[in-house]
Amino acid sequence: MSNADNTDMKFETLSIHGGVEPCPVTGATSPPICQSTSFVFKNAEQAANLFSLKESGFIYSRLTNPTVNTLEQKIAALENGTGATCTASGLGASMLAAATLMNSGDDFVASQKLYGGTCSQFRDSFSRSFGWHCNFVDPTSPENFKQALTEKTKFIFVESLSNPEGVITDIEAVARIAEDAGIPLIVDNTIATPYLCRPFDFGAAIVTHSTTKYLSGHGNAMGGVVVDGGTFDWAKHKDKFPALSEENHGGYRGISFSRDFPDNAFAMHNHAVGLRDLGMGQQPMNAYLTILGTETLALRMKQHCENGIKVAEYLNNHDSVSWVSFAGLKESPSHELAQKYMRQGWGGALFTFGVKGGYEAGLKLVEGVNFFKHLANIGDTRSLIIHPASTTHSQLSDEEKIKAGVGPDVIRISVGIENPDDLISDLDQALRQSTAMAA
Ligand SMILES: *Cc1c(COP(=O)(O)O)cnc(C)c1O
């Protein structure tokens, strides 16, 4: 389905029908799982055309696969992009996007308020293995991004709604700074999902996701995606981004991606060169599970968000809780931005709060809950809880923990789609246990 066909469909309809056509051979309406590494050529001429990008089709599943392609079309439709490239995980998506944009010795500017795994990737592996330097800035003032730009800056990277603190970035303001600098803004839209926020509407050039979270939604499939907004003028900035404009790049003779694929040069490059050479493609079974999850994204997100605000308000009024960091609450510094960037001003369903009694009370709380599962994922149908200081962030010094917003008293919860009354009574009994000792 081409993007032009999607423009009249509302989000819920797009979630079901976007990108999916009945199988032309069998008529199957649920996308078949094409568990095949390679695809038979019709003849020698077609084979040669596929390899030289003169024709589009399937060659080998490291580059493209029909089931994965269906998911890519669906996510591109939901984000209102022109193409998408699925990866093995969310970190595979940031890796793929950066590899297309960066040359060794280049730098980029990223928000400090990012998922911890992305921070490690940007800070440690990107610089050590590839010579890509990241300047981290406080995103609450867009001006900070401008200050950090250098001659060699190739992109700006932010999360629309940050994991885990729920900080919202002023996407439009940062997009303007990126545009003035002639570089793309990449928005990791994992926690908001396109149901709450569509970064392309506010000037972002590229969107990434960990589809492991809300898009697949059931805690059963790893995956990531890079979505091409189709608006960035690569040819105009060809000195900065030779991979996208130079002829013969990646061994494709006579091809310049920005000239020959003007609508989706970035997505084409991510498949034809990125996945081909870096090898982080998504598996068909995971794509299938994520397609199923995406069909109910609107229903689930609505329930996640309604439960999220109820649980946040309950915690905010609880004597044993010292603070709640949730954009849906009026006193949150992100509350005003939520009105602009998030559907209905919702704050999502992932946030942190502080429990009185510190480290020990935090441990007691994660052990005392029943419905809330104590584990390291988010964005599942189930409610999830973790004490970052003793787990995900235990390797940081005390000072670094505070900076990362995960001091000893911090609890992260991902509110699921159960009945909110059950969730609140579960937290209630667990908080009573955990703070009885502190009192
Ligand atoms: C989980 C997550 C990632 C990384 O995704 P994986 O699928 O675990 O590799 C990236 N960004 C955000 C916001 C995340 O929550």
Image (cartoon, grey):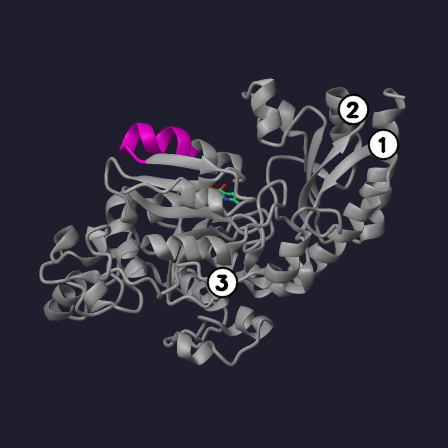
Question: Distance from label 2 to label 3 (Cα)?
Answer: 41 Å
Instruction: Report, in whole angstroms, how far the alpha carbon at label 2 lies from the one at label 1.
Output: 10 Å
Dots 2, 3 in contact, CB < 8 A: no
Q: Position of residue 106 (x, y in %)?
A: 27, 39
Q: Secondary structure at mark 1?
A: loop
Q: Amino acid at mark 2?
A: Ala
Q: Is residue 129 magenta?
A: yes
Quadrant placement of the C terminus: top right
Tag 2 near tag 1, CB within 8 Å: yes
Q: Which residue: 20% across, 56% down? A: 238
Residue at the spot of label 1: 320
Q: Position of residue 236 (x, y in %)?
A: 23, 61
Is 332 in the magenta?
Answer: no
Q: Is residue 182 above or below residue 396?
A: below
Secondary structure under tag 3 reads helix
Look at the picture and state if 407 lies above or below 99.
above
Magenta residue span: 121-132
Residue 361 — which label? Answer: 2
- Looking at the image, residue 110 lies above or below residue 389: below
> Where, by quadrant of the figure, is residue 294 drawn?
bottom right
Rounded to the nearest whole Å, what is the CA distance between mark 1 and mark 3? 39 Å
Q: Residues within 10 Å of mark 3 (few under 14, many from 20)?
A: some
Q: Main secondary structure of the magenta part?
A: helix
